[in-house]
Image (cartoon, rainbow, N blue to C red):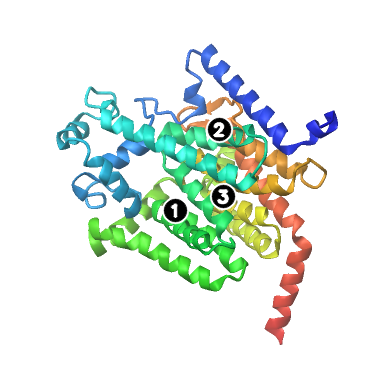
Amino acid sequence: MNKMDLCTNTKNNFIILSFSFLIILLLWIFISSGEYTKTFFFEDPEKCDTGMDFVNSVADVTDGEAYTKYNTLYPPLANAGFYLINKTIDHKNFELWFLYGRNSKYDLRLNKNMLLSLIMFSVISVLFLLLEIKSCLGNINELFPFALTLNYGVLYALERGNSIIFVVALVFYFCMNYDSDKLYKRELSLLCLAVAFGLKIYPAFFGVILFKEKKYKMAIKAIIYGLIAFFVPFVFFGGFNGVIQFIDIFKNFSDGTSTVLNSYGISNIGNFICLGFETIIGKDLSVLRIVMIPILWLYTNLILLLSFLGEKQKWKWVLIISLFVMFNQTSYDYTLTFMCIPFSFFIIVNQKINTNNIVYYICFCFLLLPYPSFSLSLSDRINMHTIITMIIILFASNKLFIDNFSSMKNIIISIHKRLNS
């Protein structure tokens, strides 16, 4: 391999950048005596919050009252798993936890069974994702799967103790095997998608690939599996009343997080844009928020939909759906973990950097690399990484639309003719 090949190789460049930024990140943390982790990861100014997505979820299924008492946001399939872990811990520990909370001597993170469960789940999730990346890319540089696995979204999810790494690995398996020649792999891919839906809900959007591929029987089967994975576990969490309570909790959470500025939902991006203008001109722009956010939501989802309809490349399908997921949720930076999937498919068909793919390659790098950032407002937990990511995902959405404009134009003309015939 000559020097030019090294410079244009998509995998090797990402490996070099990834490990370079990881070294810089570690040095930055060391030089700051650990203070930089407050900027890079989720930070609660009052109490240490590391691992609390996992710990809270295990605690909030105590006595099976996930929805009736503790208002947990996770679907019942996820809560069933958390309940199994809950039963390995003495009930008295939870009573003291709810009474004294974090950073006390009764902090559940000090419990051996809780800590081991968190560590084991994190290790299994990362290994699962690593295996899916290796399986997708085949015989490539062995360092690349490790470099991709250690991306910003994964690191953020590990700090939170969030299940999204495991969910992304499940979706990854689906995207790789729904069109497999082997029946058992196709069936297993549908089960993986159903389980992912049962754990996080929004992975269901990846099922539209089956409609895109005109695999209607598989799509119907996927819907049935998904409904079973979602509704059956409610038997253990309140039955029909549990369903109603979960819907109310989910709606209240979405409404309550519409002003949280460090996620990539459209409402949060719109709020951030308005906040920027308010800071510049020194005036309240509440009216602009009311008007702009629905318009931005409609515009962004419309161009993604049209792009998906006109697109023929698989890696772009997965990228479009990943962007759609990010735009239509209110979770934190760990949602960037989904970008592992389209980037892996991108690497398969783009071994070399060229004028046709360099823009997308740069976008993936900004979304995945754990580059250092700096805080803009600790109270809102905003840093430069958040701003850059918002810009990149909006840019990538419009880039996809522009690249597919000719195809979409033909689709619109065809629809217009059918309506007039």
Instruction: Identify the residue at image location x=61%, y=71%.
Output: 214
Q: Are marks 2 and 1 in contact (CB under 8 Å)?
A: no
Q: What residue type is labelled 2?
A: Leu
Label 1: which residue? 196
Instruction: Identify the residue at image location x=67%, y=35%.
Output: 141
Q: What residue type is labelled 3?
A: Leu
Q: Could you say which disc has been placed on residue 178 in the image?
A: none
Q: Nearer the viewer, mark 3 or mark 1?
A: 1
Label 3: which residue? 288
Q: Is mark 2 on a helix, strand or loop?
A: loop
Label 2: which residue? 150
When asked about the image quadrant of residue 143, the answer is top right
Q: Can residue 63 be seen in this view?
A: yes
Instruction: Identify the residue at image location x=70%, y=64%.
Output: 310
Q: In the picture, which quadrant includes the C terminus?
A: bottom right
Horizontally, is 317 left or right of 164 in the view?
right
Q: Can residue 263 be seen in this view?
A: no
